[in-house]
Image (cartoon, helix red, strand yellow):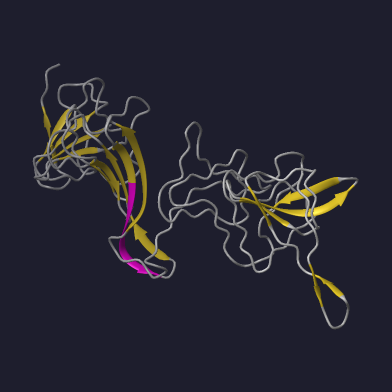
Amino acid sequence: MSRQFNQVSYGLTQALINENPPYILAKRAPLTSDFAQPSTIWINSLTNAVWILATVANNTATWVSTAGGAGVFSSLTVTPGPISLTGTTTINTAGAATTTIATGGTGAVNIGNATGNTSITGTLTTSAGITATTGQINTTNGAIGAGNTAASTAAPQFQTLKSRGGATIVTGDGIGNLVFAGFDGTQYTTGAAITSTSSGTIANTRVAANLNFLTHPDAPAGGPTSRMTINSAGNVVVNAPDSGTALTVTAGGLTVTAGNIVATAGNITATAGNVTLGAAAAAFVFANGIQIVAGTGDPNGSVTAPEGSLYLNTNGTGTANRAYINTNSGTVWTAITTAS
């Protein structure tokens, strides 16, 4: 047990004046049997811990550690702050109460540090946006999705937004990349990608752009190769493949409602089935102007074609009305005698 006597001094206004109690320096923590004057400071010289005597009642001393401890607050306001927390800190671990941080101010709320991670065990809901100035937004086992739960026709959407620090972009700027990468044992390597680059005139409500589809060849060298491009005018270009056929339609056919199918090099080949001209007087047109025309009757006076063109009458029944050759680059046709 440690006891302490009040120190007094003589004064002019009264005979005795109580002085502040001196601190107690010990090599242990205080006990409830260590009595002293309330507000006395106890210092453990071995641990540098400090206590203050709050009360002495019923021969029991209550010493309060200045190192802090658990507490219950209905509210806590610190002005000007800050509040510094060391070690593992948990806020609102039990119950259904909502924990709100910085809803009334206009300043930024910073969570985390440069080397540690910030973990969220529940669903993260934001009324504005999520901005990652550097790094990525990753999921270890799940998906990053865009949902729209509004009772409207609006669809969910992913956006890639490009500016030059808030200024207008220029032609040639990349405005979005969708990259598919896999870990190769050393690093993440791009296996495929869809990219978009601005092109043409950039103006108010006008950003011309293309879409480029890339895949990585089955080879160790090089990176993803452009396989197909849709330009800002809507033209689709399928590039030469590493092997095989560039475009294969396995079923359903290919219909051209207007325009031409042009083979600048190579052939149009039907390995099974036919190349069919469905309309009456449809024609094969050769580069030198000669045509092969199909029809249902005698072409004399009714079908115009370059001289030397061949006309096939699909309704011909004899040896002199099945095939004709044009002889004047007009409507004059000469019948070709065929075998019966």
On the rendered structure, is 269 left or right of 201? left
> Is-magenta flag for residue 202?
yes
> Is-magenta flag for residue 151?
no
79 or 149: nearer the viewer: 79
On the rendered structure, is 269 left or right of 175? left
On the rendered structure, is 58 left or right of 7? right
Q: Residue at x 84, y 53 (%)?
A: 55
Residue 57 vertical position relative to residue 242 in the rendered view, above or below: below
144 or 252: nearer the viewer: 144
Q: Residue at x 28, y 41 (%)?
A: 214
Q: Name the spot of residue 157 as percent of width and height, x first.
A: 52, 48
Q: Give the extent of the magenta segment.
A: 195-203
Image quadrant where residue 19 sits? bottom right
Magenta stretch, main secondary structure class: strand
Q: Name the spot of residue 182 as percent of width and height, x first.
A: 33, 33
Residue 49 vertical position relative to residue 278 in the rendered view, above or below: below
Q: Which quadrant is the N terminus positioned in?
A: top right
Q: Name the spot of residue 235 as percent of width and height, x first.
A: 29, 50
Image quadrant where residue 13 sits? bottom right
